Amino acid sequence: MKYIVISIILLFNTLPMNLPIKVYKGTGTYSSDVICNLNNNKVYKKISNYSSDIICNINQNKIYKGTSNYTSDVLYNITDGKVYKGTSNYSSNIVMTFKDGKIYKGTSSYSSDIIANIKDNKVYKGNSSYSSDIEFTIDGRVTLVEFVALWHAVKYAY
């Protein structure tokens, strides 16, 4: 019995715990619907895990272009629900703001400035909640910084 328990513990310790989180077009769930995937703080094209297919990578609260970690290659930095362009922390460089499951343009909080609505791992166009307006679906839980990296891959890498 002792050996069985030890074997089970070793088995679980060798299994990959960081399974990739996939992003699907609309409500799709087929591998052909995968737009990108997040694995070990890197966003890859489609279902790839090759370093040449890295769209962006995450380091703390910053998102970098490709595999770079240079300051000059910072795409976004995220602080307090606000997404800043590059390394800036100036309000004039806020690209979008997250509040109550909605993404707003810049620093706005007006309903007319809602870029997307997030509900149940689905991202809807604007303030919609219609299934026909689902832009993409994420098959797992992600942090705000991870979400922004996935957003970038979906919106700007394709």
Image (cartoon, grey):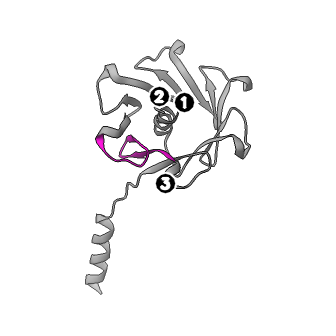
Q: Indicate the position of residue 135 as horizontal and vertical percent values.
A: 62, 40
Is 46 in the magenta?
yes
- Tell me how far mark 2 sits from mark 1, CA to CA: 7 Å
Q: Nearer the viewer, residue 48 or 80?
A: 48
Q: Secondary structure at mark 1?
A: loop
Mark 2 or 3 closer to N-term?
Answer: 3
The residue furthest front is 32
Q: Are marks 2 and 1 in contact (CB under 8 Å)?
A: yes
Tell me: residue 66, above or below residue 89.
Answer: below
Q: Identify the residue under disc 1.
A: 81
Between label 2 and label 3, give the one nearer the viewer: 3
- The quadrant the N terminus occupies is bottom left
Q: Which residues are magenta?
A: 34-51
Q: Can you identify the residue that label 3 sits on?
A: 31
**Mark 1 and mark 3: Cα distance apart in space:** 31 Å
Instruction: Give the secondary structure at mark 2.
Output: strand
Q: What residue does disc 2 label?
A: 78
- Mark 1 against mark 3, which lies toward the viewer? 3
